[in-house]
Amino acid sequence: MSAIKIESYSDSSKDEVAGFILNIQKDEFGIPITLDMQPDLSDIPKFYQLNNGNFWIAKTNNKIIGTIALLDIGNKRGALRKMFVAKEYRGKEFGVGQILLTNLINWCKNKGIAEIFLGTTEKFIAAQRFYEKNGFIEINKTDLPKGFPVMDVDVKFYRFIILG
């Protein structure tokens, strides 16, 4: 495998990113969701790449193998969104998820973001373990800050405090 490259999203990858995410959501995990139900994927720059937010793509051999996004929700807080890794690249062997998350956390440190929040579905059990291993603490939905975009499928919520 060639090196894993992380790059900021550009619209030249729009259809490929949407297809990549929908494939994991629908085909792999059976989540009844469509592109129309995710307006953020229709205009990533206007949704994520504002203020201190961004959207990143992990690639190898010019193929998307992962995504992650940070939505700036104000008050030095961000929402981690759209973290997906292709099934064949999950786990410690390739470390794609870890590379993406480390990139996002470093971005937050550089931008002065103090806290990251996220919501996830009950079906993403491995993702929940991954977040917990990386220092995310489960919180109640009522403890989310105002401005956090709760998705209908989200049932577990996490908070990460940036140190340093």
Image (cartoon, rainbow, N blue to C red):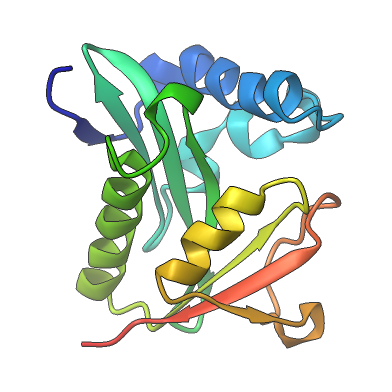
- State the residue at coordinates (32%, 47%): 100
| Residue 112 as seen in the image, left or right of residue 156 | left
| Residue 151 as seen in the image, left or right of residue 48 | right
Looking at the image, residue 23 lies above or below residue 156: above
The image quadrant of residue 138 is bottom right
Q: Residue 72 or 27: which is nearer the viewer?
A: 27
Looking at the image, residue 84 lies above or below residue 24: below
Looking at the image, residue 129 lies above or below residue 29: below
Q: Quarter of the image containing the N terminus?
A: top left
User: Residue 117: horizontal and vertical position, in percent?
Assistant: 56, 71
User: Residue 139: horizontal and vertical position, in percent?
Assistant: 68, 82
Looking at the image, residue 30 lies above or below residue 116: above
Specify whether residue 72 is in view. Answer: no
User: Residue 86: horizontal and vertical position, in percent?
Assistant: 47, 26
The image quadrant of residue 30 is top right
| Residue 77 as seen in the image, left or right of residue 121 | left
Which residue of the protein is positioned furthest toward the left in this rendering? Answer: 3
User: Residue 110: horizontal and vertical position, in percent?
Assistant: 20, 71
